[in-house]
Image (cartoon, rainbow, N blue to C red):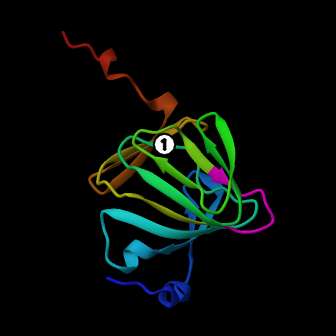
Amino acid sequence: MLLRSKEIDAMVPRPHRHQFNDNAVRMTRSLSDAVGMQRIGIHLVRLSPGRDSTEFHYHDSDEEFLYVLSGRGIAEIGQERFEVGPGDFMGFGAPSKPHAMHNPFDEDLVYLMGGERNVSDVVHYPRIERTLVKSGGRRAWADWDNLHDVSSLRRK
């Protein structure tokens, strides 16, 4: 299906607030939803000054990418920080280094974001020591203190 630029411009951006980071608020136009895609999410995102894109994280299954269209931001990838701007591309295979972006600048950061929508995935948030499990239509999380190694359950 074709989605024309005037149709994209007419879409009302929807706020997406990250469940673990109140400062991570993205204004999102879901291009893939508009054309009926289910296995891949493609979103046109605007990140206001001072906002985070997400909580610092990585996926075990879902791959993701970001392509900056306008504005600038600070990308955190693993232990490194990079200033990013128009034309910069970031790709995150699964699993990848943890990543997130922040917009400390005075103008909006606009980017195309995409990724897989696997039925099952595990997402790790190393800074807050939390893991989210997506499986069977359910999303559940646990703090790392509440995760137990299966090998501790030795059978006799």
The residue positioned 39% from the left and 80% from the top of the image is 34
User: What residue occupies the far right of the structure in this picture?
Assistant: 106
Write the start and end of the magenta stretch as one range. Answer: 101-109
Q: Quadrant of the N terminus?
A: bottom left
Q: Quadrant of the C terminus?
A: top left
User: What residue occupies the far top of the structure in this picture?
Assistant: 156
Secondary structure beneath disc 1?
A: strand
Find disc 1 in the rendering and name its residue. Answer: 58
84 left or right of 62? right
Count of residue discs = 1
Provide residue 54's location: percent of width, then percent of height. 58, 54
Quick one: label 1, few (<14), some, or many (20+) residues within 10 Å? many
Provide residue 75's location: percent of width, then percent of height. 64, 48
Q: Which amino acid does the dot numbered 1 rest on?
A: Tyr
Residue situated in front as seen by the camera: 1 or 18: 1
Asked if residue 114 is among those painted magenta in the image, a careful observer would answer no
Name the quadrant containing residue 50.
bottom right
The residue positioned 68% from the left and 41% from the top of the image is 81
Is any part of residue 8 visible from this angle? yes
